[in-house]
Amino acid sequence: MSRILQSPRNVWCDLPVNDFGLLVDGDDYYRAFYEAAQTAEHYIVLAGWQFDTDACLLRGPEAEQAKLPVMLLKYLDALCEKNENLHIYLLAWDFHAVFALEREWMQQLRFNWATNDRLQFLFDAKHHDEGCHHQKFVVIDGRLSFLGGLDLCDHRWDDRGHKDPNPLRLSRGEPHKPFHDVQAYLAGNAVSAELAKLFVSRWKAAGGEPIELPESRATTAAYEPLGAVKLSAGRVMLSRTDPQGSPTGTENCKEICNQHLDAIAAAESLIYVETQYFSSQEIGDALANRLRGTDEPPLDVVLVLNMKAETLKEEIAVGLAQSKVLRDLRKAAEGTRHRLGIYYTVPATDGDAEPERATYIHSKIMIVDDRLLIIGSANLTNRSMAVDTELNVSVETEDPKDALGKSITGARLSLIAEHLGVSSAEAHDASGLVATLNDLAQRREGRLRLHPSPTEKELEWLEKIDPQQLPFDPGAMESHDHDKSIFVGGLGALWTRLSGGASTAVGE
């Protein structure tokens, strides 16, 4: 059995780690960050798609018993006031105006005004013209890191029960949708130092004053936060999507795309995926080709996705392209020995009535044959594979029955159990997994449901346009023309295809 992860094709760096595992959902990750940040002696760096000053890190009794503030900005400011040697840096994507109504206004002013001078916030717009910064990671003193799909912002907190309603699932005093995501924790000097270098490189490129982060002292103390799904890994691999190749300067890094393509090609029995979006033509084609293979061993493919796009903007940008990918995958699996299961999940409710809304899937995970686990910021979209900046961490074993393989199996079972609404011990193993999950979903036993896409409406749209030709989800760095960008030309291109009329770019 040859290894899937190999540098430089699909790995940026291969590094030792003391402790590694998953924190599933915001409750466990926000608590872990809150507690770990208090141990910082010299620095904390945070890079993300989005931060909110009033993101609530602790809820309920934990918040009531906390000795420091639980809102993000007040908490970070209090840490600086408490420790005169502590420096905190936050680097957020300088979002496009199309997102203005979804973001907290005047963030740079809020983070930097009337706060400690050693707390600094910077927007980062130094990315490819058609892309954005989507990496989400934290480094504390060069010894402990977090990375994955979760940002420290509003509307992202939930616990693993996904109960609806949940009086603790509030943002700015208002209830929000059930929300599922996963973050990794990595304890170790080598991996944290590499992530710190990445942050410093991006900070400098974004126009920030040069920063020097002190080297951390070696530590052997075990780290296992509350709620952790521990993975028995001694080494981890970091991979990127980054047209600019920060911090190495190697242009057009597509390590994440390559690792997914190679994982699909190498799969022998099982592919398990959780992703917010699945619109990547390249990844979709690779999986479809694998499902068409009649000489390959039978494969169980489990995809856990969102039930539908949340907004019209989301439907146009990636929802329709995802419908096309799912349609093609279903066609590819027809008449073969392979088993394809596509699902969404619903929250836990009181009573027998069907929940009115689904749990929002925001995680980005792939598990293959219980020997490879990938987690990070990258969705299975064209842009995450090509033009956005993304960051994943992976572990691999050549023997799924060794300690690491068994822990990957445990992580997969834990995730499936959460989606079913049962304990890990009751979750189901890989053999015949799709058949079992289909049966449970059809009988609505548990919280897993069969995914409805493509719907009749989506099929009607797919007859009129090819969503892969729209500029919302670019799969290559082909143009630096402002008029062809995702935000300027996209709506005009869509209107042309739907109406057959002349295109008028947004903003003209």
Image: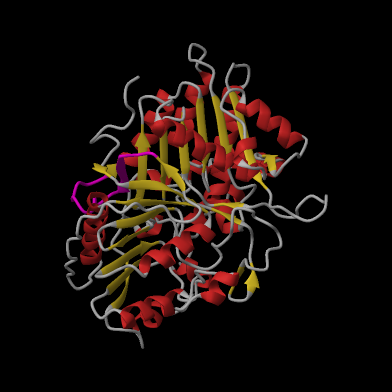
Indicate left or right for 411 with 452 as reference: left
Outermost residue toward the right? Answer: 352
Horizontal placement of 179 versus 198: left or right?
right
Compared to residue 104, the image places residue 361 above or below, namely above
Rendered residue at 30%/44% (across/down): 238
Give whichever of 382, 199 is nearer the camera. 199
Residue at 35% in and 84% down: 115
The colour scheme of the drawn protein is secondary structure
- With respect to residue 72, does 127 lie above or below? above
Image coordinates of residue 449 in percent, x first then y, are 69, 41
Of residues 287 and 148, the one drawn nearer to the viewer in this rendering: 148
Asked if 72 appears above or below 336 in the picture, the reply is below
User: In the image, residue 410 lies at what x, y percent?
Assistant: 51, 37
Q: Quadrant of the N terminus?
A: top left
Judge whether 374 appears above or below 371 on screen. below
The segment highlighted magenta reads 232-252
State left or right for residue 6 relative to residue 23.
Answer: left
Q: Is residue 96 magenta?
A: no
